[in-house]
Image (cartoon, rainbow, N blue to C red):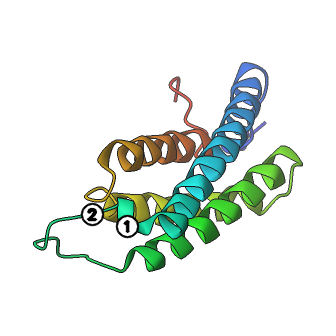
Amino acid sequence: MVRNPTTRTGAAAGLTAGLSVFAALLLLMSGVLQTLEGLAVLFRGDFFAVGTDYAYRLPTTGYGIVHVLLGVLVLALGVGILQGVAWARQAAMVVVFVSAVANFLFIPYYPLWAILLVALHIAVIWALAGFDPRH
């Protein structure tokens, strides 16, 4: 009998399911944090300042809108993964990648917060990819 290498059974299936829940919870946390980041930028844009030498300078309002939209989308995908929506897993990996890039570009404005979100997004991508250390 030939076993399909993409089908996991036993402990591997449990690990994959656990990583999916882990990823969904990280998505929910990341979505909330990113939405709060975007709202902070929209309401207190004058708080965020960067030197004139930053190559990717956008108005803070633009960053705020992008972060709010991405945060809400990440939140929705986290809920979708918890509900078992089939396409949410792949969509979340793409959106989280874009969100990580957006936070990378935001590092000069608020480094600690942006780096925290980039790290969370890397963990989400790792968990959604279903990494199994035994393979």
Farthest residue to the top: give it: 11
Instruction: Give the structural element (helix, strand or loop) at label 1.
Output: helix
Q: Is residue 77 above or below residue 43?
A: above
Q: Residue at x 59, y 53 (%)?
A: 36
Q: Which mark is residue 49?
A: 2
Name which quarter of the figure residue 21 lies in.
Answer: top right
* Front residue of this view, candidates 83 and 71: 71
Q: Residue at x 72, y 42 (%)?
A: 24
Q: Is residue 129 left or right of residue 18?
A: left
User: Mark 1 touching mark 2, by CB under 8 A?
Assistant: yes
Farthest residue to the left: give it: 53
Disc 1 versus disc 2: nearer the observer? 1
What is the three-letter code of the residue carrying label 1? Answer: Asp
Name which quarter of the figure residue 2 lies in.
Answer: top right
> Can residue 83 be seen?
yes
Q: Which mark is residue 46?
A: 1
